[in-house]
């Protein structure tokens, strides 16, 4: 008898799960139906800032596969602009609203994948719904913002929030010739970095002409005839033609919570290593779930397409009667603000101490290439290590071209519980166009090992 798999959400996690399940079970064995409330499937949300900046010229370039391809090649039925509004676990049904027609219906399922993604934080402030204020979460948001910039007449913009999205949108607006101010309630942009490294990011942003208002919170938006006119903070009023909200995201888990699925302290859906939820036959993956941090040993919610694709793949393999597990994360991420690259992995100093570690930290300054080679640029590398044992707990990098991807080597060392003494012997590639003879990673590891030796 043919089983029916219903997938809620048609982006990274949902379509990875559907595709992997189809690879292992044919249409006669498993009927697959996907409901997506947006206009697109399988697109790169991480590419949205570059669409806004006009580095990527067309939105369609960000779409990996369209519904027609899923139907014709994989026998996966995708319904765009269809929102799942409830899950009835007793009847094994979902309620669906057709957002174009306004009609509602119910769909039965044997297996269910919840891949509802994340919800952007949108403050409940006066004027927040005015024209000219944009959140940037899904491709439709990026298209709307890009169209507004293309129309012209945007001279001044305010970005609210100094995290990854805030930085990337500030960069996009600068590249579009807009005067940009960024408001961040913390004392630095990039709160996922330690203050000393976040200060480097702040300096880089100021050098690009971005005005930073740190330690301030937005209290409201002034409007006229429904149009944005100014942003009001705890310290000032700023005239603005456009606002981008970059206040982060939360797991979009309310639908699952209402259905009775277990939701964790992070707000993400609780799953096991196979991406099974607390209810048999119901799976979850992507930004809506919480996952296991391999260093802190605590649950964490991280909204990244890399994790979503991997988790969806794991769920799909298991749905296809294979076996796979998701091993957790170490929190590796990278971004840039024009010519300055920023990367981190593992725990920062405060995070490590909160997790119960005693730490040592070193910061080293080096160059991205041999110092004499044209194009050599400065970079700083910070390592956070466990006191006495010397085990790597986290790393951060701020530098220019070719700096950020060095975080991958540090993430691998972290993943494998290496000590900084172990790392001093790593056989890393060397040639003057790519690295000094002592790579910055090796210099940092050596300095950290010396620090650990002094404390034992």
Image (tube, rainbow, N blue to C red):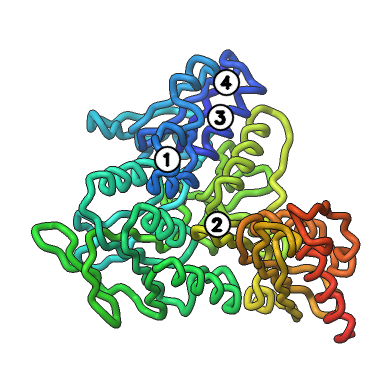
* Residue at image location 43% in from the left, 49% down from the top: 49
**Front residue of 415 and 382:** 382
* Residue at image location 79% in from the left, 75% down from the top: 386
Q: Residue furthest bottom?
A: 455
Is tag 1's residue or tag 4's residue first in the polypeptide sequence? Answer: 4
Residue hosting label 4: 30
Residue hosting label 2: 335
- Per the model, the C-alpha gap separating discs 1 and 3 is 19 Å
* Residue at image location 9% in from the left, 58% down from the top: 225
- Per the model, the C-alpha gap separating discs 4 and 2 is 40 Å
Q: Is residue 245 above or below residue 181?
A: above
Discs 1/4, front? 4
- Per the model, the C-alpha gap separating discs 2 and 1 is 37 Å
> The residue tagged with tag 4: helix, strand or loop?
strand
Kindly check if marks 3 and 4 are in contact, taking CB atoms under 8 A apart as contact. Answer: no
Question: Quadrant of the rendered structure where residue 213 is?
Answer: bottom left
Kindly check if marks 4 and 2 are in contact, taking CB atoms under 8 A apart as contact. Answer: no
Q: Which x, y percent locates residue 9?
A: 45, 38
* Residue at image location 45% in from the left, 77% down from the top: 186
Q: Which x, y percent locates residue 266?
A: 53, 62
Q: Which x, y percent locates residue 227?
A: 15, 58
Residue hosting label 3: 18
- Per the model, the C-alpha gap separating discs 1 and 4 is 20 Å
């Amino acid at each position: 008898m043919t089983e029916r798999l219903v997938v809620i959400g048609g982006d990274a996690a949902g379509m990875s799960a559907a595709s992997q399940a189809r690879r292992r079970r044919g249409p006669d064995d498993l009927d697959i139906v996907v409901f997506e409330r947006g206009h697109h499937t399988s697109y790169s949300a991480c590419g949205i800032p570059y669409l806004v900046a006009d580095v990527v010229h067309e939105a369609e370039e960000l779409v990996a596969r369209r519904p027609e391809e899923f139907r014709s090649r994989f026998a996966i039925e995708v319904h765009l602009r269809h929102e799942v509004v409830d899950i009835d676990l007793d009847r094994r049904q979902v309620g669906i609203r057709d957002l174009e027609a306004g009609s509602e219906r119910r769909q039965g399922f044997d297996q269910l994948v919840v891949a509802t993604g994340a919800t952007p934080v949108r403050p409940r402030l006066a004027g927040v719904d005015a024209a000219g204020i944009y959140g940037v979460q899904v491709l439709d948001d990026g298209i709307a913002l890009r169209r507004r910039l293309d129309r012209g007449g945007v001279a001044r913009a305010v970005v609210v929030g100094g995290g990854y999205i805030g930085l990337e949108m500030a960069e996009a607006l600068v590249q579009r010739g807009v005067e940009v101010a960024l408001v961040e309630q913390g004392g630095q942009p990039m709160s996922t970095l330690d203050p000393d490294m976040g200060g480097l990011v702040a300096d880089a942003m100021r050098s690009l002409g971005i005005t930073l208002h740190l330690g301030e919170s937005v209290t409201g938006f002034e409007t006229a005839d429904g149009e944005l006119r100014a942003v009001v903070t705890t310290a000032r009023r700023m005239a603005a033609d456009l606002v981008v909200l970059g206040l982060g995201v939360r797991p979009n888990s309310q639908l699952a919570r209402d259905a009775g699925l277990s939701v964790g302290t992070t707000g993400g859906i609780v799953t096991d290593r196979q991406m099974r939820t607390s209810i048999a036959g119901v799976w979850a993956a992507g930004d809506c779930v919480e996952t296991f941090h391999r260093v802190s040993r605590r649950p964490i919610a991280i909204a990244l397409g890399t994790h979503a694709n991997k988790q969806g793949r794991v769920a799909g393999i298991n749905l296809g009667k294979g076996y796979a597990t998701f091993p957790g994360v170490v929190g590796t991420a990278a971004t840039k603000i024009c010519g300055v690259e920023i990367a981190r992995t593992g725990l920062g100093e405060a995070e490590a101490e909160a997790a119960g570690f005693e730490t040592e930290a070193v910061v080293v300054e080096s160059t991205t290439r041999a110092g004499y080679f044209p194009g050599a640029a400065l970079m700083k590398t910070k390592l956070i290590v466990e006191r006495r044992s010397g085990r790597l707990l986290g790393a951060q990098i701020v530098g220019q071209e070719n700096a950020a991807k060095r975080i991958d080597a540090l993430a691998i060392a972290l993943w494998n519980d290496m000590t900084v003494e172990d790392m001093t012997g790593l056989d890393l590639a060397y040639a003057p166009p790519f690295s000094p003879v002592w790579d910055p990673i090796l210099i940092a590891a050596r300095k950290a090992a010396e620090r650990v030796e002094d404390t034992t």
